[in-house]
Image: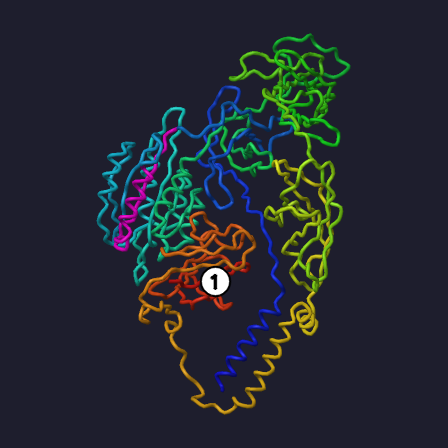
Amino acid sequence: MRRVWLMWLAIGIVGAALLAAPPGISLAQNSGSPIQVFVIPPVTTSDNGSTLGVRVPFRLLDAEGNSVGNVRITDLKLKLHDMPPGAIDFGVLTQPIERIASPIYVTMLIDTSGSMEAELPDVRAAARATIERAPANVQFRIVTFSGQYGNPQLSIRQDFTSNRNRLGDAIESITEAVGGTCYYDAIYNELDRLGSVNALPNAPARRALMAFTDGQDMVDQVGRPCSNHSLDEIIQRASAQQIPIYTLGLFGSLDEDVLTRLANDTRGMAIIGAQSELSALFAEAFTDIVNQYEAEFSVLPAAGRNRSQLEVWLANPSAVVTSAIFEFDSPRSYIATPTPIPPTETPLPPPTATTVPSTYIRLDPAYRDMARNQFVFPISISNPRIVERLFLRVLAGSETKYQSGPVDVNGRDAPNHEVRVDIDVFEPGREYKIQIIGVDVTGHDLLKPMDNFNKEPDPVLAELKEFKVEAEPTPTMTARVNSVTWALPNSDQWGKFVVELTIDNQQEEITQWRAYILDESNKNVMDTDKEVFKTTTLVVPMPPDLLQAVEEPQPKDYKLYVNLWSRSGAQTDTNVYEIKAVVGPAKPGLLAAIWIGINDNPLIAIAIVVVISSIVLYFVYGRKPTGPAYSLARPAEEYTVVASANSGGSGKHQGKLMVDVVETPSPGERTRRTFNRFPCVIGRSSQCDVRLTGDSHLSRRHAQLVLENGRILLTDLGSNNGTFVDEHLIDPNTAIPLSDGQVIRLGPQTRIRVSVSY
């Protein structure tokens, strides 16, 4: 009877807890990743006489740290910081943007300590595949390392060469794994070798070090390290020689924090994974090494150290890359001396070729002012004190299609101006040139300054050579949001906005819709998947922060708009509808929460009855123990071994692991999958077996599952927000047995059920 009471009580408590919990809200998050630009060393300079050439290498990474190479760069801008008044504070791009074609020297440093014996075949295959895919301008050096305490051992398998056959033979010669891990000394020595690589004239050598290990720098029981150099020494050495270090490692005994710091502080990349992912690890590191761009600017900097800002513009106007800050040294000052303006009472001298004032003008890409039906062309002037007026003209071929009225500068310190041109001036689909010309305060034509790139005086101060207006598609429908309402917590629509639309000029059937919600900073805080359009009343999930119970709810502003698609694929956007909502419903009291729960779900009342009746059964039948007061808990293996019916109960029959994503912010990622190869890795990385990009709280490699002889083993891979079993945080890098059908929580928002099938 005691067992019956315990089972009855457990059912009641669990049922009450599950049923009393607030209903889950299905929220989809924006999985789009912003692209960031990183300047990589070395930034080189060259004296061009009147200007300084600055060559800036850079790379593009997405939010997960993956190299981005399939984008089209449309513009680059370089701005000089902390320049004196009147100085030219921007650079002029002097050559097309292109991927770096100068030689790249890469040292591939491979751990051959004793712990690597089982991994060496996979390491050889991954290294050889990386070399075979490398461009012709890449030269490799193959070095292995091991050693004992205070006595590191390095073996040069092949010095720098682009001969793929010789490199392949060098890789295949790596067959022995003995000794300890002298990681720091191996890297330090190879930095010196890489630093001595000679650069070619006008083409500085690119250098990188790929350091692979499955452990960490060894220290014996008395604290004696295997290496003679420290982590800080390596970082200082790499920074001084401007060599990025790419740290590759296998999960296990290595120190991930060390590898991450070593990579980040040298502007490299830390890539850590499982043995089964070795080829992907090597490929990811090498892709970042070769997938780099280079731009060259002509600038007029001050002498010494100059702080600058690089901006990269992509083909998609909404994907402007975050600016990157970097520094370079100028051997002298190139700041031009402004042409003096004579007093008004003194007669102006006759113009001569040597006294004609000049200035740099920058014409930025135009943007539309839809309210006024105009294009706006922003103009920046480096030395406005010598400028009287500017004009913008539009050329169709050699014919002047349009010339604007004067932009009056009048010699004032006003560097930024704009010219507005009616959109009707431009014929859709036709290509135009946009030019800026001007007059100085003496009444003479302004001329572009002569330098190594402009050999003759040029009255065209700035130019957009390819300006084209795309034809606007004829709208097939117009739509607007009329109202947005939401219900109280005890309503069927709790947790959702009810959006009412009005659709006009509808010529085609609407088939799909999608809604977006932005917060006060215009950050996308919620978007739905594409839904089938059935009615003009849409139900849209609220942002997560509106559903968090707080003591003192505060109002907050949101913006909502909707995309609509017709059967032909034509898209229409609604107006932006502003919502003022209270963030977080107030926390109800205990009795109020129970009453709301009972109204929402009568099964809660049944659960309460079960709990009360189980307590009564305990006092009637369970007060006299029939066995010992205390007993040892059974070992975990007794309930984690899962065997099939035809395995004889031995637990050795290997089944398949079923992973069911039962709760995650992105509804489209709630899937069920089956695996028979292990480990099964879960996280946001593209290399994971179960990839959940919609939950930003998950780590790139969050946790892994293994099925061994019917036992399900869970390991947290050092995640940022933890892995929970029965709502208890488990220790990282420690295998935990699970029962069949058990639900685990990854971070605060994702739950996964795991089970075994045969």
Q: What residue is shown with label 1?
A: 753
As drawn, the residue found furthest toward the right would be 345
| Magenta run includes residue 235 | no
523 vs 408: above or below: below
611 vs 531: above or below: below
Q: Is residue 742 left or right of residue 440?
A: left
Q: Is residue 29 left or right of residue 675?
A: right
- The location of residue 109, given as percent across then percent down, is 31, 44
- Residue 563 falls in which quadrant of the image? top right
Between 140 and 78, which is closer to the camera in this rendering?
Answer: 140
**Numbered range of the magenta stretch:** 102-131
- The location of residue 337, given as percent across then percent down, is 61, 21
- The location of residue 60, given as percent across then percent down, is 49, 38
Q: Quadrant of the C terminus?
A: bottom left
- Label 1: how many residues lie within 10 Å, few (<14), some (14-19) or many (20+)? some
Between 23 and 102, which is closer to the camera in this rendering?
Answer: 23
SS at mark 1? strand
As drawn, the residue found furthest toward the bottom would be 624
Q: Is residue 720 left or right of residue 427?
A: left
Between 718 and 279, which is closer to the camera in this rendering?
Answer: 279
The residue drawn where x is 55% and y is 30% is 76
As shown in the figure, which amino acid type bears the numbered disc 1? Arg
